[in-house]
Image (cartoon, grey):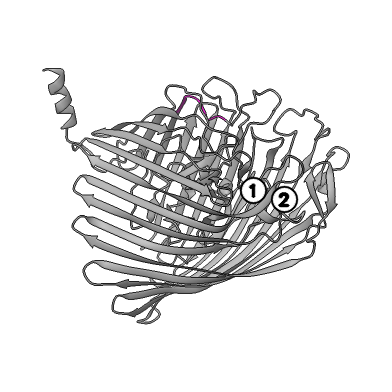
Amino acid sequence: MTSKALLGLLLAAPTLADDVEHIIVTSEAMNEPGVVVTDPKQPRQPLPAQDGADYLKTIPGFNLTRKGGASSDPLFRGMGASRLNILTDGQTLLGGCPNRMDPPTAYLSPQSFDSIKVIKGPQSVLYGPAAATVIFERKDERLTGPSLEGNVSATAAQYGRREGAMDLTAGNQDGFARLAAIKTRSDNFKDGDGNRVNSHYDRWSTDLQLGWTPSDDSLLMLSAGRSDGEAAYADRMMDGAKYDRTNLGLRLRQDNLSSWLTRLDGQLYYNYVDHVMDNYSQRSFTPSMMMPNPSVANPDNRTRGGRLQADLALGKGLTAKAGLDARSAQHRTRSSMNQPMMPYQDKDRMADGRFEQWGLFAEFSYDLAQASKLHWGARLDRWQAKDQRQTLSPSMMVSLANPTYGQTRHDNLPSGFVRLEQGSSIGTWYLGLGHAERFPDYWEIIGNSRASSDSASAFHTQAEKNTQLDGGWILRQGDLNLSLSLFFSRVDDFILIERQAMGADLVRNIDADSYGGEATLGYQLTPAFKVESSLAYSRGRNKTDDRALAQQPPLELRLSGQYRLGDWNLGALWRLVVDQSRVAVGQGNVIGLDTGPTAGFGTLSLNGSWQPDPHWQLSFGVDNLLDKRYAEHLSRAGAAVAGFEQADKVNEPGRTAWVKADYRF
């Protein structure tokens, strides 16, 4: 038999287990116009994610600002922090660090959720104004009889990566109890040149749900969660010594109340984050001019909120979702510049900022003729913020009176959208126009004592006003899956952070444009062989300064192939990222600032899985097979950490082999 004939036989080989799950490497196509839904329990490449940001980076359009091995900050189309609305089961969770050491995704373990939903652009008013909304969700359990089900997994990889996770549900038709627990750790990784990066971490989390289901239409659920850990960072003078999260939630849902009120869903929640960062517990203490003694900072953030939503059937083809939501967040801090002599635990916490929000929303869907749908909605948010800082500290050696101490500001911010969807024999296309007005967040107007153009305080920075056009096309025909989403955004009063030669960073409003999009393509060449690809691009312009908009990701292409034979699945991923020369050095956002151009790179990774039966699956892979040294454009600049080589940017891990075992029952 010739090699050509053998290759043809392999490609035509029938699969022996059609339900074998392949490793996701380029992300799923859009499930519906402007929406991507993915299963975080499925194996993925790169190395299975240890927090929410690590997972989001596998979805086209998302990028990371790496700081170490954990707690990266995610951005979508170059927009991050509060421009990216991140929710967990409808709840808002906020970090504590003024310098974004602990973004919300740092507290989220993807495997404890059932789905992750991404809404692209301001194309919904249900969850607040944002450039995109990410919802980490657990499904509503409703058991038909006595049952025990769940899954457990274990992950091992180079650099001491170890993870154990379980998600168990027990109960019957009257109620259930669900427990999710994860423990993960890693040593410092090495980049492609073999240089160690200060990046070790050790985390754990537990989440419990207790539900009562007295009927098929009723649910009363109490939820509680705790997590903690520590993490080292390569981009700053301190590491994270404590990530204490406490969560409590109560949810009540009733379906089929009447012919027009199909669902009433209400919830209350409480989230508290107690964060500690220091310069000695996770690294060798080295005195410096800025920190001559062991030093500690201990911010915390307490968030309370609630939400009530009614689902309505208003007539033939017309449905609506309407309701209200509210939340308040109180941020406090305390610190010590000489922990041995003046422990931070002996000091009182000082409140520095309080934020409150109330929102009303209504979103409608109408089925038109000939497979077309019209969606529209409106929202009004009432914001209030109070500056509680008596003094400002633009640097560690300077302190001055705060000119906005005790001041309160109010804003009424409208949002809305309209979108038309049209189905046909060649797929579904959509076109939507959205407008979202975003109130400045804690990190922009209070954290880090930033200044404005005319004041030592940035407290009165204007709200952003984003008007965005979103459009796209979804095609599923036979063995071909194609999705395309494009956007053009105009932001008035875009909040820009700018580094100053002396003193605090400057916060100012500019006008900005950005455009781009994502495309995914999957084709089943034979019953055994599938190819997939994704392309993501965004480009921004600072119209006020007539220069590039800072912190924009470069063009990225992913190509993958999956070969399946019986219980086995083998694949490869080739990731190509072009250089980024459109930069604005010294400008950016609360996550990071542009430091200069970044070279392009390409990485090759291999993966595989074995599923001998529906319960067991073994996944394995090698990331960065060629051991290339590279850094993502949006990653932070490296800091001088004793015992480690300082890099221009925090580099990515070098060659990394990993294996993951899953058991579902």
Residue ID at (55%, 39%): 583
Front-most of residues 165 and 630? 630
| Label annotation for residue 450 | 2
| Residue on which disc 1 sits | 497
**Above or below 609: residue 654:** above
Q: Residues within 10 Å of mark 1 (few under 14, many from 20)?
A: many
Where is residue 127? Give x, y as percent: 50, 64
Q: Secondary structure at mark 1?
A: strand
**Above or below 552: residue 190:** above
- Residues marked 2 and 1 touching at CB (< 8 Å): yes
- Check the picture and name the quadrant holding the N terminus: top left
Residue ID at (27%, 42%): 522
User: In the image, 7: left or right of 242?
Assistant: left
Where is residue 403? Give x, y as percent: 81, 59
- The stretch drawn in magenta includes residue 481: no
Task: State which quadrant residue 640 falls in.
Answer: top right
The type of residue carrying mark 1 is: Ile
Is residue 347 among the parts visible in the rendering? no
Q: Which residues are magenta?
A: 651-657
Where is residue 354? Give x, y as percent: 71, 62
Specify which label sits upstream in the sequence, 2 or 1: 2
How many marks do you count on the picture?
2
Where is residue 621? Give x, y as percent: 40, 29
Q: Secondary structure at mark 2?
A: loop
User: In the image, 5: left or right of 654?
Assistant: left
Front-most of residues 119 and 417? 417
Residue ID at (30%, 63%): 421
